[in-house]
């Protein structure tokens, strides 16, 4: 893979992978929060059922003095997850059902694992898609490079005959006229054309996979001898 192709591949891969990766990260986070909210609602429903029967071993039970705390609401702090329920004929206390934070995190651990597992699966899919997309995006560039190589190859081939003719005529003029400033300028112009041809040859050599050697000096000398 050529340098320009590698650069194009890496940029396409990074753009595709990064954009989809960010999107999947956001979707995974939103989905996790939604499942966590659903889990909390189910937990509150279990607490409400336990409040009526008090026959539940899943929660710890306590009684707390009444204050401005909300009832029938899941409350979270650093130490516990709890809910308060009013007690019939109990004017001074609330019934408190609660989890410790450690118990709560053990309950939602499966949500973390599920979210991470889905995230990794999607990132692997995105990785494969990014590679395929990046390779597919190289086809127009490769076609353009092929056309450019063919164009340069044709130019190099077409340069040989007129350059050889000019060198031959210049040699004949040197024999007839001798040293002349105008002829020297023409000779320098031909050398510039040869330099341009050499640069095009270097480009062709650097970009094409199949190498073709052209002995320009031999062609010129052959043309001059004829």
Image (cartoon, rainbow, N blue to C red):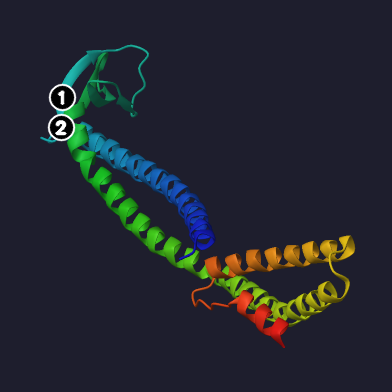
- Mark 1, mark 2: which one is toward the viewer? 1
**Residue placed furthest toward the bottom:** 226
Residue 156: x %, y % from top left: 67, 76
| Residue 34 relative to residue 111: left or right | right
Q: Residue at x 68, y 69 (%)?
A: 197
Residue 51: x %, y % from top left: 22, 31
| Residue 25 relative to residue 97: left or right | right
Residue 28 higher or lower than 186, as above or below: above
Q: Quadrant of the C terminus?
A: bottom right
Between 113 and 196, the one lying in front of the other is 196
- Cα distance between the residues tagged 1 and 2: 9 Å
Q: Local crowd at mark 2 within 10 Å, few (<14), some, or many (≥20)?
A: few
Are dots 1 and 2 in contact, CB under 8 Å?
yes
Q: Secondary structure at mark 2?
A: loop
Residue 131 higher or lower than 39, as above or below: below
Q: Which residue is mark 1?
A: 61
Residue 35 higher or lower than 72, as above or below: below
Q: Residue at x 36, y 55 (%)?
A: 123
Between 210 and 188, the one lying in front of the other is 188
Counting every numbered tag in the picture gives 2
> Is residue 186 among the parts visible in the rendering?
yes
Q: Local crowd at mark 1 within 10 Å, few (<14), some, or many (≥20)?
A: some
Q: Residue at x 47, y 67 (%)?
A: 135
Q: Which residue is mark 2?
A: 54
**N-terminal label among 1 and 2:** 2
Residue 16: x %, y % from top left: 50, 56
Residue 100 higher or lower than 119, as above or below: above
């Amino acid at each position: 893979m050529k340098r320009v192709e590698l650069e194009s591949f890496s940029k396409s891969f990074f753009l595709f992978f990064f954009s989809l990766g960010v999107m999947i990260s956001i979707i995974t986070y939103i989905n996790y929060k939604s499942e966590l909210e659903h889990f909390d609602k189910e937990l509150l429903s279990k607490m409400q059922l336990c409040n009526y029967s008090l026959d539940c071993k899943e929660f710890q039970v306590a009684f707390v003095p009444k204050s401005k705390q909300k009832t029938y609401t899941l409350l979270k702090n650093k130490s516990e997850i709890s809910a308060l329920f009013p007690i019939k004929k109990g004017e001074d206390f609330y019934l408190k059902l609660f989890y410790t934070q450690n118990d709560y995190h053990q309950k939602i651990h499966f949500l973390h694992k599920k979210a991470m597992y889905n995230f990794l699966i999607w990132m692997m899919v995105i990785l494969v898609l990014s590679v395929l997309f990046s390779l597919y995006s190289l086809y127009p560039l490769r076609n353009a490079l092929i056309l450019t190589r063919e164009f340069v190859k044709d130019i190099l081939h077409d340069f040989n005959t007129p350059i050889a003719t000019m060198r031959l005529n210049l040699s004949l003029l040197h024999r007839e006229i001798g040293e002349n400033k105008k002829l020297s300028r023409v000779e320098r112009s031909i050398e510039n054309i040869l330099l341009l041809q050499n640069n095009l040859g270097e480009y062709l050599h650097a970009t094409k996979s199949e190498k073709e050697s052209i002995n320009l000096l031999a062609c010129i000398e052959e043309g001059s001898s004829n």
